[in-house]
Amino acid sequence: MTLNRRLFTTLAASALALGLAAPGFAADLSAIEDAGTVKVGMLVDFPPFGIQDNSGNPDGYDADVAKALGEYLGVDTQIVPVTGPNRIPYLLSGQVDVLVASLGITEERAQKVDFSDPYAGISIAVYGDKGVELTEAAGLDGQAIAVTRASTQDSGVTAVAPETAQIQRFDDDATAVQALMSGQVKLIGASNIVMSQIAQATGDRFDKKFDLSSQVQGIAVAPGSDALLEKVNAFVAEAKTDGTLDGIHEKWLGEPLPDFVKTDK
């Protein structure tokens, strides 16, 4: 790396950390193919999407998607651990070619990066004891339901619950989940990630009642990486139709890829 490029990388990362606009290095598909490696930025602290295995290697939903993408491109996959704050700076400074980093597609982020079609998603739902028959918000009348304070599930439940619902707010997911599992409450507002973790621990004791909201995640490339983005979108489309993403989602979240991800473009 030249001194000028190193300086640019530092300045670009600093500017983006401050929320300022900065130019990015467009990834060249031909260069990736010639190098025989695609560099993929990925979180390793966001289970089950990004974790580290017992040997300290990146693992999880996003790691499996990254490896499948590399196979589709016909190149090796080099996973580069990133964090929530630095993942977009890493992409725009050319330190990675793509992000498979649990990056929710938002209008603000789409001004900085180019997104593929969705490959994953996080949903928020009301979840709880199988003995509670509940299919809509009106059924929360008189029910006690746990949520994590100031979270997406807190705002989602609060927005739809009748005034007679007893919303119990806890400081973190673990405490809210404990309230459910101990029987303190029979319902919880939770993400599909938390629901999967509860199901792994308790089997079929609980089930999902109804959805509150959802957000899709996309693979991100730097603006101007048009040929690469086209190839990534072709990969996502094939992985949705041939069962690849269903299998990965089943492995890490206990169910096939949700319909809201499959149908979103």
Image (cartoon, rainbow, N blue to C red):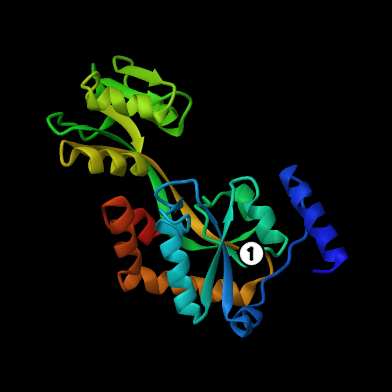
Task: For mark 1, give the secondary structure.
Answer: loop
Left or right, 201 with respect to 60, comes to left
- Say which residue appears at 59% left-offset and 46% top-offset: 84
Please state which amino acid type lies under the numbered disc 1.
Answer: Val
Q: Quadrant of the N terminus?
A: bottom right
- What crowding class fits label 1: few (fewer than 14 Cα within 10 Å), some (14-19), or many (20 or more)? many
Can I make out residue 64 in this image? yes
Q: In the image as oriented, which residue stretches furthest toward the right?
A: 4
Using the image as rendered, state which of residue 176 and residue 209 is in the foreground: 176
**Left or right of 46 on screen, residue 206:** left
Number of marks in the rendered image: 1
Residue holding disc 1: 96
- The answer, for residue 265, to whether it is visible in the render is no
Q: Is residue 237 above or below residue 212?
A: below
Quadrant of residue 192 within the rendered picture? top left
* Residue 233 percent across, percent down from the top left: 49, 71
Q: Residue at x 39, y 30 (%)?
A: 173
Q: Position of residue 110 (x, y in %)?
A: 62, 55
Residue 261: image x %, image y %? 38, 57
Residue at (30, 25) in percent of width and height = 178
Is 244 in front, or is 82? Answer: 82
Q: From what the image shows, is residue 35 above or below residue 185?
A: below
- Residue 22, position in %: x, y? 78, 55
Q: Quadrant of residue 59?
A: bottom left
On the rendered structure, is 232 left or right of 166? right
Q: Is residue 63 left or right of residue 30?
A: left
- Single out the residue that lies furthest toward the left: 131
